[in-house]
Structures are given as structure tokens and as C-alpha cells.
Image: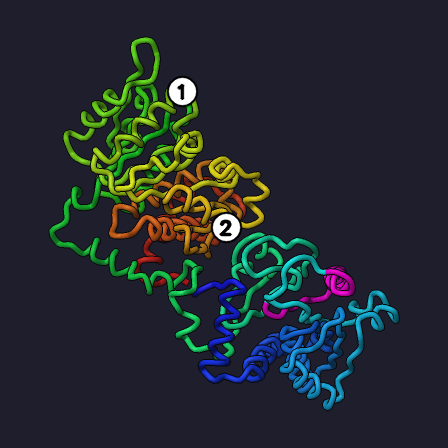
Amino acid sequence: MKAVTAGEMREIDRIAIHEKGIPGPVLMSMAGRAVADHVISLGPSMRRIAVIAGPGNNGGDGYVAAYFIHNAGITVDIITVMNGKDHSESALIFRRLCMASGITERPFAEAIAADVSCLDDYDCVVDALLGIGFTGTARGDMADAIQLINDTDVRIVSVDIPSGLGADGAAPEGEAVIADVTVTMGLPKLSLVTYPGKGYAGQVIVADIGFPTSLTRSDSLKAELIDNDFFSENTIRDNESYYLADPDAHKGKRGNLLIVGGFDGMEGAAMLTARAAFETGVGLATLVTTAAAREIIAGSIPELITASIPFGPDGTAPSMEEVEEALNSACGGRRYDVLVIGPGLGRAEFSKRVFDAVIASAGRWGIRKALIDGDGLYHLALMTDKRALDPGIEWAVTPHFKEASRILDLDIDEIARNRPLAAAMIARRLSCAALLKGPASIVSDGERHYINTTGTAALATAGSGDVLSGIIGALMLRKLTAVHAAACGAWIHGEAADLHCAGGHYPVMKSTDMLLRIREARDRLFCGCCP
């Protein structure tokens, strides 16, 4: 399913009304009816409803909802907050209908003058104050109304988007309604499926109000949920079926993954990456690490080839030639297909020189796709020219907020306030696929966003990102672009956690627990049985 910005949604509205011939009041009636249907479905406990209606079409949706709630035999009152603005023409149609039906309407100032806690007398409040066109900070009665809604203990249902929240993925600039449910029209808005906006939306119900699918599935829409539609429309399952069904396959055909990391004291990071890659499906995998780390790791993962990078005679970092020699020795002349560098790499000068040597040489080793994670992102941020990454390689990076702040030279708070924008900025700066980790992780190629729909807070545990790197590295060996591999990897990673937690283990999970669920999560994706 696509997700839209305010501008994209306005364009869908415009085309639907002016080019497809769907009257605006028809769309409004469908929208308001969807809200009413949800409120009515809550059952007999919904005896008295307040609809808080603002100017414009969002308020019009509220009038429609009030009309149908009233027709269902439920008491409904309308409280208006106009802030000196007028109703839209479509909204006036349904306001007149409500007045003719005997529904009570009163201004906000009058309602709170009579009882400052007036909303506590209702069983549900419908927030129809501000729609997707709102930007900035709510002021005057509008701000007071939002605060009053948030102060009540009753159920809150927002129309299209919680009032005060912009649609384009950024944090609200001022007060915003914190809803229990948001009934959004046609398509989810970007802020409803990414944080921090998602935290205001509650449960999101996407209502079909009659927009043609040619509009709601258009390639011109730049954001998409990583869900069943995404996997089907991008022929990801076809690619996987071809990969697994080849009767002439051998381990070489299934790709050779190179992992660089797991240096002294951080061996576990690279081990998690390697194990996750094997669980996802690789033909061959080689880990290059330090000699001391190799002694710990060698044999612990039977399928994994290990090799060590020697220190210089005086304990200094190896030269590029020594790195290449170690790799060639480990691989017996075979070429690598995909590189994962960073898990457990460390930040010492030795690690930096290894990182620089590997990044500079990757193309000569046959690398087609590469993922930089963990400590690799630390060294990447220190590169003077971040565009020096080999343009012949498809690159992907998987930063969390702090790593993203280093790459972009921005405060962490700025990253967190607008995550789609931050992901796009990283992708454009590095000419790569960027996966900004966090709840509802975002994958971006600089123009398009793919938003993950799996995962829980249990993923916030040591080694979780190392597991993700292994999953994505294995997927990069397939016929997937770096962007699609990152998107599928994020989904599998989150689904593995969901499967573990569904077994009654939430919220406690170790990264090794996740490894045991990767194959089941992978099969759910590629077999077409994901939710």
C-alpha cells in the first residue's frame, strides 16, 4: 500500500474531482460515513458522541459522521472551532443536513464557558478539527480545543489525521491530538506510518472512499509500506522462486558473501551477522577478522570460512596489499559478490585502515553490492569525500539515529523529528540505499521511501543490527536491488522478532533468539503468506 504526503493527497483529490468526475460532496459523504461506521461499531457503550468540527473539509467530514451517528440512534453533539474561518461549500451541505435533523451545534467558546470539562460527559470524541492541509502551530481556540481533547479520558477518533499533526512525516510543531484511532481516507498519510507521528495516530484504519486504483496505486506516489502489495508488485517473490528452483544450482551460483568485522572483543557481532546470513540463505560466506578473533570464531559456525588480517611487525595496521593477500588466501582465488563491513569492526586506527583498504578495493574483488553498518558507519562519516564510494557497486547503509547524525552532521533530535527526510538525505549524500533504523524503519533511495510494518520494541537489544546486516547481505546475493534487499531485510528482521514475541516472550528477546525465527519469517515473505 502506498503512503502519501499532503501534496500527493491533494493531487489525488483534484484528479478524482476534476478529471474523473467524482463530486467533492460524494467523497466527503463516503469519508464521514467511514468515521461513523467505526464509531457505531464500538457497540452499545457509545451512547453520547461529541464531534469537534473545524473549518474546511475535515470539519465537513465531521458533519457527515455526526449525521450518520445520529441516524443510528446515538446522541451526538457538534462543537465548532472556526478560528475566524468559514466552512467549505461541501461542508455547508452537510451542516445544513445536520441542522435539519435536529443535531445540536454550539461554538467551542460557549461549550467550555458552560463546562470547562464538557468532553468528559461523552463516550467518544470525534476530532474533525484540522486536516492534512494544516502546517505550523495551532493557535487560539484551535490550540485550546486540542488540549481539551487530549485532557479527556474518553475514546478519541481522529478524522483523516490527528489535528495539529502535519501529513508529511515531521513531528508536530505544537500541540497535536493523541488519538486512539485515526480513520484516514484513501491512503495512509506519511505521518501516520512513521514516527513520531505514528505515536499520535493510535490504530490507523484506511477507509476506501472511492478513489480509482489508478490514483491510489500510481507510480508517481513516492512512499510505500513494506507489505504484501510491495512484495507482489515488485516481483520479489518471482525472483526468489527462480533463485531457489534452479535445478542446476551449486553453492557458487548462490553467491559468495564477504564479512569484515568481529575484531578483538567484538567477535559476537560478526558471528551474529554470519549466522543470520546462513539462516537467510547464502552459498558461501567468508569472515575476515583479526588473528586473535579468528582463533575464537573458527569452527564455531561450521559453514563459515574464516581468515585473518595480520598486524604489521610493529603492531600497525596492514597495508592494502596485505589485506588483499589475506582475502585471496581465504577465498582460494574465488571472487566475492557481496560485502558486509562494520559489525564489530571497532574504531581504532587499525580498524580505520582496514575499512579504507576494503572500501577502496571492493570493486577489484568482484563485489557487486555492499552494506556498511555499525563501526563501518563511524569510519564512513570520517571520510572527507563520502562520494568516493565505488559507483560500480550498489551500496547500502543501515544507520541508527546517532550514526545518521554523524553522516549528516545534524543533531539527533533533527534526525528523529523527520525520519523520511533524514533517510532521503543520507541516500542522496552517499548515492546509496539508506535504511534508517528504528520503529517503522525507513528505507530510501533518495526519492522513494519504503516503510517497514513489522517489529516490536524487543528489537532494541544488543546485536539486533548485526542480525539485520546478515539478513540484508544474504538478500543482496539474490536478484534484488540494494534498496529492495534492505526493504525485505527490514521486514524479515521485524517479523522474526514478532514471531518470537508471539510465543509469549515479549518484551524480552536476545538477538540469538531472533536467529531461530529467520527462516520462518523469510518463508512467510517469499511464500506469499505474510499478513
Figure disc tally: 2
Give the vertical position of 78 relative to 176 (above or below): below
Which amino acid type corresponds to the residue marked 1 in the rendered image?
A: Glu
The image quadrant of residue 277 is top left
Q: Position of residue 497 (x, y in %)?
A: 45, 49
Crowd band around label 1 with a 10 angstrom C-alpha radius: few (<14), some (14–19), many (20+): few
Residue placed at 64% from the left, 84% from the top?
A: 68
The image quadrant of residue 298 is top left
Instruction: Tell me the tag on residue 56.
Output: none
SS assignment at label 1: helix
Residues rendered magenta in the picture: 139-160
Q: Which residue is mark 2?
A: 421
Q: Position of residue 521 (x, y in %)?
A: 37, 53
**Relative depth, front residue between 362 and 36:** 362
Q: Position of residue 182 (x, y in %)?
A: 60, 66
Marks 2, 1: nearer the viewer? 2
Q: Residue furthest bottom?
A: 100
The image quadrant of residue 347 is top left
- Quarter of the picture holding the C terminus: bottom left
- Quarter of the picture holding the N terminus: bottom left
Q: Position of residue 245 (x, y in %)?
A: 18, 56
Q: Which residue is mark 1?
A: 349
Which amino acid type corresponds to the residue marked 2 in the rendered image?
A: Leu
Is residue 12 among the parts visible in the rendering? yes
Crowd band around label 2 with a 10 angstrom C-alpha radius: few (<14), some (14–19), many (20+): many
Residue placed at 24% from the left, 31% from the top?
A: 305
